[in-house]
Image: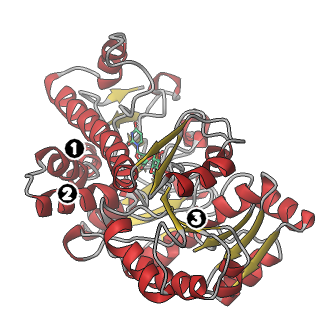
Amino acid sequence: MKIAVVGGTGFVGLTAAVGLANKGHSVFCVGRNKEKVSKISRGIPIIYEENLEKLLNKALETGNFLATTDLKTAVKESDVSFICVSTPSGESGKIDLKQIEGASAEIGKALGEKKSYHVVTVKSTVVPGTTENIVIPILEKFSGKKAGADFGVCMNPEFLREGCAVSDFLYPKDTGIVIGELDNKSGDVLVEIFKEFDGEILKTSLRCAEMVKYARNSYLAKDISFANEIANICQNVGVDYLEVKRGTEMDSRIGKGRFLDAGVGFGGSCFPKDVKALFAKGVESGVKPLMLKATLDVNDQQPFIVIKLLKQLLGKLRNRRIAILGAAFKPGTDDMREAPSIRIVNAILSEEAKISVYDPVALENARGIFGENVVYCEGVEDALHNVDACVIVTEWPEFAEPNIYSNMKGKVIIDGRRVLDPGKLPSGFVYHGIGLPEAVKT
Ligand code: UDX
């Protein structure tokens, strides 16, 4: 099938465009930024994502992938378009739909000049009712055509995790594929595309598909905040959260593999934004979303637990040297959007301590956020050289390796993700972490 991916230079758009091309579809990857489009055309994927570069180049070689700024031609020459533009948090957490509105207007204009049937699909995360109340009226206004009669409309939420987005897209076995459809005819076109993918397909209404995305992310974010709250209580009542977690997971109704790793809180481009947006939509709909509020409140305070632990072990932080290990919001990505590292670094800086930061891939993004206020280190040993303490903020596998800490001057480690086994550290260290009742001396 011929497919236009609008917003193709973003994380979701590019992943979808490359994934669809590798499934044999003919893809127009449409972006507005000429420089980004040109890089993608030359096989440079502009974001860090496992396997993306390889598969982008494979798609370019086969000739069924074209990066372009020409939205009109892309829509006119394709059967389906996916809207993948971003929907950031606007005023008081409410979703900002400017880019969705802009893309819908442009696609509408192209539809006005198109004779054959075309299905417009919203892939961006949008609150329930957006496709019906905003996207469709704009498409109809700018095309002069009628949705359902003249063109199709679908809503197909993405469930991509950063760091493994390409494989999540290509193998949706664990997430399934949700197709919200305006009518059967529209949905059947998407089924035709996704039937080759190994994942269960669920057809729903447009509104339901929109809500599924928020419900999923809110469930997962809620689990993390719940785990963090339990861990914080464990810490104060003298039990280790990791053992409690093992014990609770034995109950099959709770189970393993849930989002129950306690730490410094969730970040990223989805959970914080989506929980805020659903909260705002809930309030607007007349519900008091108490669980969503608690999820956000716990997450807001969670990064500061490591500051409390640092102070417990070091006393005043003024003029102390602290290494921050990990800046990205999670391993496997250079993304720092809403990363807990931002709050942690700012809190430590406000105590007038000195900071060295190391992250295997996110240093460039860290520079854009922390500027000249911290020292950036190319290697973990550099970051740990001459510091009084270190804080593990992101669970990159290399931080679980006890040998990297051997040459630390001050031997204090605060583990914000509980990745390090203190039993394996050389003697002389003081180790503390989230959900641990007291510091462990090695
Ligand atoms: C998430 C969803 O998993 C994905 O399905 C959706 O499409 C987009 O949002 P992502 O933001 O890439 O994906 O990261 P994820 O792996 O879910 O982690 C999000 C945050 O939660 C990270 O900061 C991570 O460190 C934190 N987290 C995750 C925990 O603190 N504890 C956990 O048990 C799991």
Q: Residue at x 89, y 68 (%)?
A: 63
Q: How is the image coloured?
A: secondary structure
Label 2: state its secondary structure. Answer: helix
Is residue 383 among what the camera can see?
yes
Label 1: state its secondary structure. Answer: helix
Which residue was labeled with disc 3?
A: 11
Q: Position of residue 268 (x, y in %)?
A: 43, 58
Which residue was labeled with disc 2?
A: 279
In the rendered structure, the answer to whether residue 55 lies left or right of residue 240 reads: right
Q: As rendered, which of 435 and 225 lies closer to the eye?
A: 225
Query: Label 2 neighbourhood size at 10 Å, few (<14), some (14-19), many (20+)?
Result: many
Label 3: state its secondary structure. Answer: helix
Which residue was labeled with disc 1?
A: 312
The amino acid type of the residue labelled 3 equals: Phe
Question: Compared with residue 303, is residue 90 higher up or lower down, i.e. above or below?
Answer: below
**Which of the two labelled residues, at mark 3 and mark 2, occupies the earlier sequence position?**
3
Query: Label 3 neighbourhood size at 10 Å, few (<14), some (14-19), many (20+)?
Result: many
In the rendered structure, the answer to whether residue 213 lies left or right of residue 178 reads: left
Q: As rendered, which of 396 and 128 lies closer to the eye?
A: 128
**Which of the two labelled residues, at mark 3 and mark 1, occupies the earlier sequence position?**
3
